Amino acid sequence: MSTRPKVTAEPILSLRDLAMHFPAGGGGLFGGPRRLIRALDGVDLDIARGETLGLVGESGSGKSTLGRCLVRLYQPTRGKILFEGEDLAAMNGEKLRKRRQRLQMIFQDPYASLNPRMTVEDIVAEPIRVHRLARGADIRERVKELMEMVGLDPRFIRRYPHEFSGGQRQRVGIARALATQPTFIVADEPISALDVSIQAQILNLLADLKERLHLTTLFISHDLSAIRHVSDRVAVLYLGRLAEIGPAALIDSDPRHPYTVALLSAAPRPDPRAAHRPILLAGDPPSPLTPPSGCRFHPRCPLAVERCRVEEPLLRELEGDDKRLVACHLAEEVSHLMGMVGRVEVSGQHLSRLTLPSNASDVH
Protein backbone atom coordinates (compact mmCIF):
# COMPACT_ATOMS: atom_id res chain seq x y z
CA MET A 1 0.00 0.00 0.00
CA SER A 2 1.42 3.39 -0.97
CA THR A 3 1.76 6.28 1.42
CA ARG A 4 -1.06 8.77 0.87
CA PRO A 5 -0.21 12.31 -0.19
CA LYS A 6 -0.61 14.56 2.86
CA VAL A 7 -2.78 17.66 2.94
CA THR A 8 -2.58 20.41 5.51
CA ALA A 9 -6.33 21.01 5.76
CA GLU A 10 -9.45 18.88 5.95
CA PRO A 11 -9.82 16.72 2.81
CA ILE A 12 -13.01 17.39 0.92
CA LEU A 13 -12.26 14.49 -1.45
CA SER A 14 -10.18 11.34 -1.03
CA LEU A 15 -9.38 8.63 -3.57
CA ARG A 16 -8.47 5.18 -2.36
CA ASP A 17 -7.02 2.64 -4.83
CA LEU A 18 -9.01 4.20 -7.69
CA ALA A 19 -8.83 2.21 -10.92
CA MET A 20 -10.57 2.52 -14.28
CA HIS A 21 -10.09 -0.26 -16.84
CA PHE A 22 -11.75 -0.18 -20.25
CA PRO A 23 -12.40 -3.34 -22.29
CA ALA A 24 -10.40 -3.48 -25.53
CA GLY A 25 -11.80 -6.54 -27.28
CA GLY A 26 -11.38 -10.24 -26.72
CA GLY A 27 -13.14 -12.29 -24.09
CA GLY A 28 -15.86 -13.62 -26.39
CA LEU A 29 -16.47 -17.19 -27.49
CA PHE A 30 -13.77 -16.94 -30.17
CA GLY A 31 -12.24 -13.59 -29.20
CA GLY A 32 -9.29 -14.82 -27.19
CA PRO A 33 -8.26 -13.50 -23.80
CA ARG A 34 -10.04 -10.41 -22.57
CA ARG A 35 -7.87 -7.29 -22.92
CA LEU A 36 -8.08 -4.21 -20.70
CA ILE A 37 -6.87 -0.65 -21.10
CA ARG A 38 -5.63 0.31 -17.63
CA ALA A 39 -6.33 4.04 -17.84
CA LEU A 40 -6.07 4.36 -14.03
CA ASP A 41 -4.50 1.61 -12.00
CA GLY A 42 -4.57 2.40 -8.30
CA VAL A 43 -4.55 6.08 -7.30
CA ASP A 44 -4.52 7.28 -3.68
CA LEU A 45 -5.03 11.01 -3.31
CA ASP A 46 -6.42 13.59 -0.87
CA ILE A 47 -7.59 17.04 -1.95
CA ALA A 48 -7.93 19.62 0.82
CA ARG A 49 -10.98 21.81 1.17
CA GLY A 50 -10.36 25.13 -0.56
CA GLU A 51 -7.21 24.18 -2.48
CA THR A 52 -6.53 23.98 -6.20
CA LEU A 53 -4.73 20.76 -7.09
CA GLY A 54 -3.09 20.74 -10.51
CA LEU A 55 -3.04 17.37 -12.27
CA VAL A 56 -0.46 17.16 -15.04
CA GLY A 57 0.80 14.51 -17.44
CA GLU A 58 1.10 13.61 -21.11
CA SER A 59 -1.88 12.73 -23.28
CA GLY A 60 -2.97 9.21 -22.35
CA SER A 61 -1.71 9.41 -18.77
CA GLY A 62 -5.24 9.11 -17.34
CA LYS A 63 -5.88 12.74 -16.32
CA SER A 64 -9.31 13.17 -17.93
CA THR A 65 -10.33 9.65 -16.91
CA LEU A 66 -9.62 10.53 -13.29
CA GLY A 67 -11.69 13.70 -13.58
CA ARG A 68 -14.62 11.88 -15.14
CA CYS A 69 -14.50 9.23 -12.44
CA LEU A 70 -14.73 11.93 -9.77
CA VAL A 71 -17.99 13.30 -11.15
CA ARG A 72 -19.18 9.74 -11.87
CA LEU A 73 -19.40 10.07 -15.62
CA TYR A 74 -17.49 6.78 -15.38
CA GLN A 75 -18.17 4.01 -12.88
CA PRO A 76 -14.71 3.08 -11.53
CA THR A 77 -13.52 -0.50 -11.88
CA ARG A 78 -12.50 -0.47 -8.22
CA GLY A 79 -11.69 1.86 -5.38
CA LYS A 80 -13.42 4.60 -3.41
CA ILE A 81 -14.24 8.24 -4.15
CA LEU A 82 -14.91 9.75 -0.73
CA PHE A 83 -16.56 13.15 -1.24
CA GLU A 84 -17.47 14.99 1.97
CA GLY A 85 -17.28 11.65 3.77
CA GLU A 86 -19.49 9.61 1.39
CA ASP A 87 -18.35 7.12 -1.26
CA LEU A 88 -19.55 8.32 -4.67
CA ALA A 89 -18.31 5.10 -6.28
CA ALA A 90 -20.91 3.12 -4.30
CA MET A 91 -23.83 5.45 -5.09
CA ASN A 92 -26.50 5.27 -7.77
CA GLY A 93 -29.84 6.81 -8.59
CA GLU A 94 -31.32 9.68 -6.60
CA LYS A 95 -28.66 9.63 -3.90
CA LEU A 96 -25.90 10.08 -6.48
CA ARG A 97 -27.84 12.84 -8.25
CA LYS A 98 -28.12 14.83 -5.04
CA ARG A 99 -24.42 14.48 -4.23
CA ARG A 100 -23.39 15.49 -7.75
CA GLN A 101 -25.09 18.82 -7.21
CA ARG A 102 -22.05 19.70 -5.09
CA LEU A 103 -19.47 18.43 -7.59
CA GLN A 104 -19.46 19.76 -11.16
CA MET A 105 -17.21 19.70 -14.23
CA ILE A 106 -15.94 22.25 -16.75
CA PHE A 107 -15.17 20.45 -20.01
CA GLN A 108 -12.23 20.89 -22.36
CA ASP A 109 -14.00 21.74 -25.59
CA PRO A 110 -16.59 24.55 -25.39
CA TYR A 111 -17.61 23.77 -28.96
CA ALA A 112 -18.61 20.18 -28.20
CA SER A 113 -19.87 20.49 -24.61
CA LEU A 114 -22.74 22.90 -25.33
CA ASN A 115 -25.90 21.76 -27.11
CA PRO A 116 -26.09 23.82 -30.34
CA ARG A 117 -29.90 23.57 -30.37
CA MET A 118 -30.35 25.16 -26.96
CA THR A 119 -30.13 28.83 -26.06
CA VAL A 120 -27.63 29.92 -23.45
CA GLU A 121 -30.53 30.47 -21.06
CA ASP A 122 -31.66 26.85 -21.45
CA ILE A 123 -28.09 25.51 -21.19
CA VAL A 124 -27.36 27.30 -17.91
CA ALA A 125 -30.88 26.74 -16.55
CA GLU A 126 -30.90 22.99 -17.20
CA PRO A 127 -28.99 21.94 -14.02
CA ILE A 128 -31.12 24.38 -11.98
CA ARG A 129 -34.27 22.63 -13.22
CA VAL A 130 -32.83 19.12 -12.85
CA HIS A 131 -31.92 19.75 -9.21
CA ARG A 132 -35.09 21.79 -8.59
CA LEU A 133 -33.17 24.75 -7.20
CA ALA A 134 -35.57 27.42 -8.50
CA ARG A 135 -38.85 27.79 -10.39
CA GLY A 136 -40.49 30.15 -12.84
CA ALA A 137 -39.06 33.64 -13.15
CA ASP A 138 -36.47 32.89 -10.46
CA ILE A 139 -34.67 30.58 -12.91
CA ARG A 140 -34.13 33.39 -15.43
CA GLU A 141 -32.89 35.72 -12.71
CA ARG A 142 -30.43 33.08 -11.56
CA VAL A 143 -29.19 32.58 -15.15
CA LYS A 144 -28.64 36.34 -15.54
CA GLU A 145 -26.75 36.41 -12.25
CA LEU A 146 -24.50 33.58 -13.42
CA MET A 147 -23.88 35.29 -16.76
CA GLU A 148 -22.69 38.41 -14.97
CA MET A 149 -20.57 36.33 -12.63
CA VAL A 150 -18.58 34.87 -15.55
CA GLY A 151 -18.26 38.19 -17.41
CA LEU A 152 -21.02 37.84 -20.01
CA ASP A 153 -23.79 40.31 -20.82
CA PRO A 154 -27.09 38.89 -19.46
CA ARG A 155 -28.91 40.38 -22.44
CA PHE A 156 -27.40 37.59 -24.56
CA ILE A 157 -29.19 34.72 -22.80
CA ARG A 158 -31.45 34.07 -25.81
CA ARG A 159 -28.50 33.55 -28.14
CA TYR A 160 -27.22 30.15 -29.29
CA PRO A 161 -23.69 28.82 -28.75
CA HIS A 162 -22.59 29.44 -32.35
CA GLU A 163 -23.17 33.17 -31.82
CA PHE A 164 -20.37 33.33 -29.22
CA SER A 165 -16.60 33.16 -29.50
CA GLY A 166 -14.64 30.24 -28.07
CA GLY A 167 -13.75 32.12 -24.89
CA GLN A 168 -17.36 33.23 -24.42
CA ARG A 169 -18.55 29.66 -24.90
CA GLN A 170 -16.18 28.47 -22.21
CA ARG A 171 -17.60 31.15 -19.89
CA VAL A 172 -21.06 29.71 -20.59
CA GLY A 173 -19.72 26.27 -19.64
CA ILE A 174 -18.34 27.72 -16.40
CA ALA A 175 -21.69 29.36 -15.65
CA ARG A 176 -23.45 26.04 -16.19
CA ALA A 177 -21.00 24.31 -13.80
CA LEU A 178 -21.68 26.96 -11.13
CA ALA A 179 -25.47 26.81 -11.52
CA THR A 180 -25.91 24.17 -8.78
CA GLN A 181 -23.72 26.06 -6.28
CA PRO A 182 -21.04 23.32 -6.12
CA THR A 183 -18.25 23.11 -3.57
CA PHE A 184 -15.89 21.16 -5.88
CA ILE A 185 -15.06 21.85 -9.54
CA VAL A 186 -13.22 19.53 -11.93
CA ALA A 187 -11.72 21.73 -14.67
CA ASP A 188 -10.65 19.36 -17.46
CA GLU A 189 -8.13 21.22 -19.65
CA PRO A 190 -10.43 24.29 -19.68
CA ILE A 191 -8.08 26.47 -21.77
CA SER A 192 -6.47 24.01 -24.20
CA ALA A 193 -9.04 24.65 -26.97
CA LEU A 194 -8.81 28.44 -26.67
CA ASP A 195 -6.63 31.06 -28.35
CA VAL A 196 -3.56 32.01 -26.33
CA SER A 197 -4.89 35.57 -26.01
CA ILE A 198 -7.98 34.27 -24.21
CA GLN A 199 -6.36 31.65 -21.98
CA ALA A 200 -5.10 34.09 -19.34
CA GLN A 201 -8.58 35.64 -19.06
CA ILE A 202 -10.16 32.27 -18.32
CA LEU A 203 -7.43 31.37 -15.81
CA ASN A 204 -7.93 34.67 -14.00
CA LEU A 205 -11.70 34.15 -14.00
CA LEU A 206 -11.32 30.69 -12.44
CA ALA A 207 -8.95 32.06 -9.79
CA ASP A 208 -11.39 34.87 -8.97
CA LEU A 209 -14.37 32.49 -8.75
CA LYS A 210 -12.42 30.16 -6.46
CA GLU A 211 -11.87 32.98 -3.98
CA ARG A 212 -15.36 34.46 -4.23
CA LEU A 213 -17.24 31.17 -3.98
CA HIS A 214 -14.77 29.26 -1.74
CA LEU A 215 -14.37 26.49 -4.30
CA THR A 216 -12.09 23.47 -4.26
CA THR A 217 -10.70 22.73 -7.74
CA LEU A 218 -9.02 19.86 -9.54
CA PHE A 219 -7.31 21.63 -12.47
CA ILE A 220 -6.33 19.14 -15.18
CA SER A 221 -3.82 20.24 -17.80
CA HIS A 222 -0.74 19.27 -19.78
CA ASP A 223 0.28 22.95 -19.72
CA LEU A 224 2.72 23.42 -16.85
CA SER A 225 2.61 27.20 -17.24
CA ALA A 226 -1.11 27.13 -16.46
CA ILE A 227 -0.57 24.66 -13.63
CA ARG A 228 2.01 26.98 -12.04
CA HIS A 229 -0.39 29.92 -12.29
CA VAL A 230 -3.41 28.40 -10.55
CA SER A 231 -2.29 25.48 -8.34
CA ASP A 232 -1.50 25.19 -4.65
CA ARG A 233 -0.21 21.64 -5.11
CA VAL A 234 0.70 19.61 -8.20
CA ALA A 235 0.17 15.90 -8.84
CA VAL A 236 2.07 14.28 -11.73
CA LEU A 237 0.33 11.32 -13.39
CA TYR A 238 2.07 8.81 -15.64
CA LEU A 239 0.38 5.82 -17.26
CA GLY A 240 -2.40 5.67 -14.67
CA ARG A 241 -0.18 6.05 -11.58
CA LEU A 242 0.95 9.03 -9.52
CA ALA A 243 4.65 9.77 -9.99
CA GLU A 244 5.02 12.76 -7.66
CA ILE A 245 2.83 15.13 -5.65
CA GLY A 246 3.63 18.18 -3.54
CA PRO A 247 3.46 21.98 -3.24
CA ALA A 248 3.52 23.67 -6.66
CA ALA A 249 6.55 25.86 -5.86
CA LEU A 250 8.54 22.86 -4.58
CA ILE A 251 7.72 20.65 -7.57
CA ASP A 252 8.66 23.49 -9.90
CA SER A 253 11.97 24.31 -8.21
CA ASP A 254 13.15 20.87 -7.07
CA PRO A 255 11.40 17.96 -8.86
CA ARG A 256 12.41 14.51 -7.61
CA HIS A 257 10.94 12.19 -10.26
CA PRO A 258 12.75 11.96 -13.63
CA TYR A 259 9.43 12.25 -15.46
CA THR A 260 8.59 15.49 -13.62
CA VAL A 261 12.06 16.80 -14.49
CA ALA A 262 11.45 16.02 -18.17
CA LEU A 263 8.02 17.71 -18.16
CA LEU A 264 9.42 20.83 -16.52
CA SER A 265 12.37 20.97 -18.92
CA ALA A 266 9.96 21.07 -21.86
CA ALA A 267 7.79 23.86 -20.43
CA PRO A 268 8.37 27.42 -21.72
CA ARG A 269 10.12 29.74 -19.27
CA PRO A 270 9.36 33.46 -18.91
CA ASP A 271 13.01 34.48 -19.37
CA PRO A 272 14.20 33.34 -22.82
CA ARG A 273 17.79 34.28 -21.91
CA ALA A 274 17.97 31.68 -19.13
CA ALA A 275 20.01 28.57 -19.92
CA HIS A 276 17.48 25.92 -20.83
CA ARG A 277 17.78 22.54 -22.52
CA PRO A 278 14.69 20.33 -22.88
CA ILE A 279 15.17 16.69 -21.94
CA LEU A 280 14.03 14.54 -24.87
CA LEU A 281 12.66 11.25 -23.62
CA ALA A 282 13.24 8.17 -25.73
CA GLY A 283 10.20 6.62 -27.40
CA ASP A 284 6.50 7.01 -26.69
CA PRO A 285 4.63 6.18 -23.48
CA PRO A 286 4.02 2.40 -23.17
CA SER A 287 0.55 1.12 -23.98
CA PRO A 288 -1.89 0.96 -21.04
CA LEU A 289 -2.90 -2.42 -22.51
CA THR A 290 0.48 -3.86 -21.49
CA PRO A 291 2.11 -1.59 -18.90
CA PRO A 292 5.76 -2.44 -18.20
CA SER A 293 6.84 -4.34 -15.13
CA GLY A 294 8.50 -2.49 -12.28
CA CYS A 295 8.42 1.28 -12.65
CA ARG A 296 6.15 2.22 -15.52
CA PHE A 297 8.51 4.99 -16.55
CA HIS A 298 11.65 2.86 -16.73
CA PRO A 299 11.61 2.16 -20.54
CA ARG A 300 11.99 5.93 -21.15
CA CYS A 301 13.97 6.94 -18.08
CA PRO A 302 17.65 7.86 -18.64
CA LEU A 303 18.38 6.94 -15.00
CA ALA A 304 16.76 3.48 -14.87
CA VAL A 305 18.66 0.66 -13.14
CA GLU A 306 17.81 -3.02 -12.78
CA ARG A 307 15.71 -2.45 -9.67
CA CYS A 308 13.48 -0.06 -11.66
CA ARG A 309 12.74 -2.82 -14.18
CA VAL A 310 11.61 -5.42 -11.64
CA GLU A 311 10.28 -3.56 -8.57
CA GLU A 312 7.42 -1.10 -8.71
CA PRO A 313 8.16 2.04 -6.64
CA LEU A 314 5.44 3.22 -4.24
CA LEU A 315 4.73 6.81 -3.30
CA ARG A 316 6.90 7.63 -0.30
CA GLU A 317 8.23 10.49 1.72
CA LEU A 318 11.84 11.48 1.29
CA GLU A 319 14.06 11.87 4.32
CA GLY A 320 13.64 15.38 5.71
CA ASP A 321 10.85 16.23 3.25
CA ASP A 322 7.33 15.60 4.55
CA LYS A 323 5.62 17.98 2.10
CA ARG A 324 5.65 15.73 -0.94
CA LEU A 325 5.69 12.13 -2.07
CA VAL A 326 7.60 10.54 -4.93
CA ALA A 327 7.33 7.13 -6.60
CA CYS A 328 10.96 6.65 -7.62
CA HIS A 329 13.70 4.36 -6.27
CA LEU A 330 16.32 7.02 -7.09
CA ALA A 331 14.38 10.05 -5.82
CA GLU A 332 17.08 11.11 -3.35
CA GLU A 333 19.63 11.18 -6.18
CA VAL A 334 17.52 12.64 -8.97
CA SER A 335 18.69 16.26 -8.62
CA HIS A 336 22.34 15.23 -8.87
CA LEU A 337 21.87 12.62 -11.59
CA MET A 338 19.62 14.80 -13.76
CA GLY A 339 22.29 17.49 -13.53
CA MET A 340 24.64 14.96 -15.11
CA VAL A 341 22.03 14.25 -17.77
CA GLY A 342 21.77 17.99 -18.43
CA ARG A 343 25.45 18.02 -19.39
CA VAL A 344 25.02 15.25 -21.98
CA GLU A 345 25.19 16.66 -25.51
CA VAL A 346 21.86 15.78 -27.13
CA SER A 347 22.12 17.83 -30.35
CA GLY A 348 18.45 17.22 -31.13
CA GLN A 349 18.73 13.51 -30.46
CA HIS A 350 17.02 11.48 -27.74
CA LEU A 351 18.95 10.96 -24.53
CA SER A 352 20.81 7.72 -24.26
CA ARG A 353 21.12 5.79 -21.01
CA LEU A 354 23.32 7.42 -18.42
CA THR A 355 26.01 5.34 -16.72
CA LEU A 356 25.31 5.76 -13.00
CA PRO A 357 27.66 5.56 -10.04
CA SER A 358 28.03 2.00 -8.81
CA ASN A 359 26.00 2.66 -5.66
CA ALA A 360 23.01 4.19 -7.48
CA SER A 361 21.24 0.87 -7.81
CA ASP A 362 21.39 0.44 -4.04
CA VAL A 363 19.33 3.55 -3.27
CA HIS A 364 16.28 2.68 -1.17
Image (cartoon, helix red, strand yellow):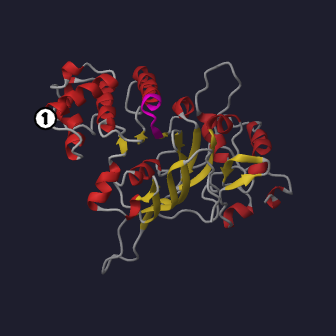
Where is 283 relative to 223, above or below? below
Residue at (40% x, 61% y) in the render:
89
Dot 1 lies on which element? loop
Is residue 240 toward the left or the right of residue 167 in the image?
A: right
Q: Which residues are magenta?
A: 210-217
Q: Is residue 80 magenta?
A: no
Picture coordinates of residue 162, whole percent (x, y): 20, 28
Residue occupying image coordinates x 23% and y 25%: 144
Query: From the viewer's perspective, is 53 left or right of 252?
Result: left
| Between 217 and 144, the one nearer to me in the picture | 144
Quadrant of the rendered structure where residue 265 is?
A: top right
Residue 259 appearing in the image: yes
Quadrant containing the N terminus is bottom right
Mark 1, other Cα within 10 Å: few <14 / some 14–19 / many ≥20: few
Count how many numbered circles sit on residues in the image. Answer: 1
Which residue is drawn at the image coordinates 19% and 33% (left, top)? Answer: 139
Report x, y in % for residue 246.
64, 44
Question: Which is nearer the eye, 304 or 136?
Answer: 136
Q: Which residue is mark 1?
A: 136
The reply, left or right, for residue 170 in relation to residue 70 is: left
x%, y% of residue 25? Answer: 35, 68
- What is the x, y in percent for residue 247? 64, 39
The residue at the far right in this view is 358
